[in-house]
Image: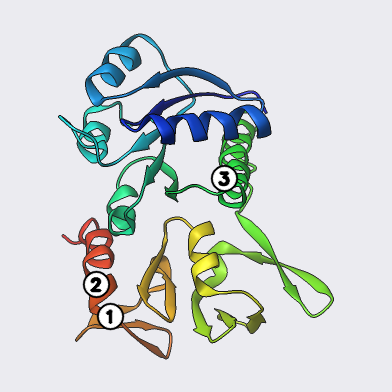
């Protein structure tokens, strides 16, 4: 898919790795490599890439601060060595959140997510009101099951398995919860070492617990701040 992008990162090695991954695995056009936020702001005033790769920890302005100064429709893939900014990142037009060092496997997953995002939005612009609901396939035994993201209530980690729960059924997946978390974006949020929840399915939050249907899910201290940062956006 022909898309244009910009890398914004103050670490030359990280920029070089990302450039190689783009060149070897995509048809994207890399318009520029910016090594600080001010250089990036100057470039983006005159140019409009489809999306940007944005590092968070940079001098002068952090990636989060820069994102707040850019056009509200700027599509962002955050890149960082720190997971604690993940929840905050989705207050912007964030497509994905990549943890460094970025592996080929993780980059390819991000590439699929990015291209699927632009495919769906291009289709929406061409033909309304036919809106494609987001989905993915889950391997259950020898069968690949199509699951709509909006139907998922939560994921529960069980050692080497993950239990996917919808209102209608529960499916055991032979994967780690961490791997699934890396592929998901908002409205899914990690709230515990054993749980990822769909915030659109929440009924209430009380006493450090989330309630979805009849299920009570604990919120751990490790993930509480990130989860509440997301919820804060919906509090009147």
Q: Quadrant of the C terminus?
A: bottom left
- List the residue tagged with mark 1: 220
Q: CA distance from mark 1 to mark 3?
A: 29 Å
Q: Which of the 4 image quadrants contains residue 143?
A: bottom right
Judge whether 25 appears above or below 5 on screen: below
Of circles 1 and 3, the one toward us is 3
Instruction: Give residue 107's mark.
Output: 3
Which residue is painted at 42% across and 72% down in the image? 197
- Mark 1 / mark 3, whichever is N-terminal: 3
Residue reaching furthest to the front: 13
Q: Are marks 3 and 2 in contact (CB under 8 Å)?
A: no
Viewer can see residue 83: yes
Q: Are marks 1 and 3 in contact (CB under 8 Å)?
A: no
Q: Are marks 1 and 2 in contact (CB under 8 Å)?
A: yes
Judged left or right of residue 109, residue 219 is left
> SS for tag 1?
loop
Residue 8, horizontal then vertical, whole percent: 36, 28
In the image shown, does 66 or 169 lie closer to the viewer?
A: 66
Residue 225, horizontal then vertical, whole percent: 21, 66
Q: CA distance from mark 3 to mark 2?
A: 28 Å
Q: CA distance from mark 1 to mark 2?
A: 6 Å
Residue reaching furthest to the right: 142
Judged left or right of residue 139, residue 46 is left
Instruction: Give residue 224's mark.
Output: 2
Instruction: Give residue 166's mark.
Output: none
Which residue is painted at 57% across and 30% down in the image? 20
In the image shown, does 64 or 80 lie closer to the viewer?
A: 80
Count of number-bearing discs: 3
Q: Which of the 4 image quadrants contains residue 114?
A: top right
Q: Residues within 10 Å of mark 2 (few under 14, many from 20)?
A: some
């Amino acid at each position: 898919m022909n898309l244009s992008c910009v890398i914004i990162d103050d670490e030359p090695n990280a920029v070089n790795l990302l450039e190689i991954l783009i060149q070897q695995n995509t048809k994207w056009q890399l318009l520029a490599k910016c090594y600080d936020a001010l250089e990036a702001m100057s470039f983006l005033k005159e140019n409009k890439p489809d999306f940007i790769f944005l590092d968070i920890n940079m001098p002068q302005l952090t990636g989060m601060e820069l994102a707040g100064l850019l056009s509200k429709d700027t599509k962002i893939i955050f890149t960082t060595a720190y997971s604690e900014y993940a929840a905050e990142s989705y207050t912007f037009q964030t497509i994905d959140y990549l943890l460094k060092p970025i592996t080929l496997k993780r980059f390819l997953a991000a590439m699929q997510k990015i291209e699927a995002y632009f495919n769906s939005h291009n289709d929406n612009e061409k033909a309304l009101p036919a809106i494609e609901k987001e989905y993915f396939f889950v391997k259950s035994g020898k069968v690949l099951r199509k699951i709509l993201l909006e139907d998922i209530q939560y994921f529960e980690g069980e050692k080497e398995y993950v239990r996917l729960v919808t209102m209608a059924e529960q499916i055991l997946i032979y994967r780690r919860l961490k791997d699934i978390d890396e592929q998901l974006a908002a409205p899914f949020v990690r709230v515990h070492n054993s749980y990822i929840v769909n915030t659109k399915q929440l009924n209430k939050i009380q006493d450090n617990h989330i309630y979805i249907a009849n299920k009570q899910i604990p919120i751990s201290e490790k993930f509480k701040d990130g989860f509440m940062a997301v919820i804060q956006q919906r509090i009147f």
